[in-house]
Amino acid sequence: MNLLKPSASDQALFEKNIKSTEQWLTQQMLGEMKLTETFSEFSKQIDQNLFPLLRSHVTMRQLHPFIDHTDHTCYRDGEVNTNSQPRAEAERLIWTRSPLYYMVEKSLPEMRFDLTDSKNVKLFPIFSDFKEMGATDYIAFLTPFGNFDTALKRSDGVISSWVTDKAGGFTEDDKETLRRLVPLFAAAARISKREETLTDILGAYLGPLASEKILDGKNQRGDGDVTDAVIWICDLRSSSTLADSMEMPAYLALLNQFFECLAEAVMEQDGEVLKFMGDGFLAIFPTESTSTIAEAAQRALDAALEGGKALKEHPSQARDLQYGVGIHHGAVMFGNIGATERLDFSVIGPAVNMTSRLQDLTKELGVQILVSTEIAEKVTVEWQKYPQQRIPGLKDAIDVYTPI
């Protein structure tokens, strides 16, 4: 226990340092904040200006299709360690053995453990690690965003823990300082999380390129740009028959396996998957100059070939699926279309229609990939050229090709 009472001058300096940290956190909220850097600096300011801080940790649940939560951990004299944890059962097992899990399960807004007491050290595995590092005290806070019960149900808030190696542990002043500063840091974290969530959600549902344009202000109906791109359209064959013959969960699983192979192949080749359309999808490979058309065309073809290979090797009945891919190059309108209160960010134009027709022709010609002359002329592979094909809406027949 700390028995020495700080002098008036020490207390004044302590209060001054608290206010300085509060002002700094406020400035962080108003600036271009990076949460990892903010948390690291926040921890350093506490350790250097307020009281010894051996370790600090903060975790937040993510509203993300693939990530469960993100942890930030900072040790004295070390860089902050940030980890985004996937939605995995193994990670949950580790989480259930932590003091923070106990805190959430018991709905405790604050929790403290004296780490000089051997009985406390035995409560959670991580406390033994802290003890070996010389820790003397541990305190944690559950800071909800909004109503406590609702936030707890949604895992919406900040859970933070703070470990000191100070002789005697945290004083009452130290605890009050954390109670004062942690909510302010949580407010900064909430702003950062909301901005990150917006970027994550837009990226997951629209693609990185479209989401970037929307965040840059292209968010009104009719907003968009005319750009050149290699257009890539894929469609699953006999999907209606499959849907009728399978239970819905099994059909959805099969459809996701199909998308997993083909769409991920596109993304691995730096293509932009813009839209899933029932049992198919639309993607583009933007071309900023004439010199990049050949490169984009090659990447688009590689995506079709590699995606087909991955599907054929898939350890499920997905390997038996039949599909068609159409690939073309041309000018497209890339922007907002839709009704007054329901918009979509996609590509439209004659080049998109042409690509769709090429995809349709794959079924008639019995091949998986068909490309236009604009693509075939740019990619040096062996092509099989078909007799000229009539395309609805076009006056003249066109040449189409498939790789051999």
Image: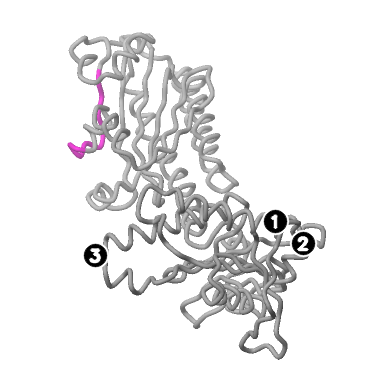
Q: Quadrant of the N terminus?
A: top left
| Relative height, residue 191 to residue 277 (above, below) | above
Q: Is residue 110 left or right of residue 288?
A: left
Between residue 339 and residue 380, name the one nearer to us.
380
Which stretch did the figure color magenta?
105-113
Tally the marks.
Answer: 3
Question: Label 2 vs label 1: CA separation?
Answer: 8 Å
The residue pinned by badge 2 equals 378
What amino acid is found at the position of numbered circle 2 in the picture? Lys
- How many angstroms separate mark 3 from mark 2 (CA)? 44 Å
Point 37% across, 25% down: residue: 162
Circle 1 sits in a helix, a strand or a loop, which is it?
Answer: helix
Q: Position of residue 9 (x, y in %)?
A: 48, 18
Residue carrying label 3 = 247
Q: Classify the position of the C terminus by image quarter.
A: bottom right
Q: Which label's residue is closer to the chain start, 3 or 2? A: 3
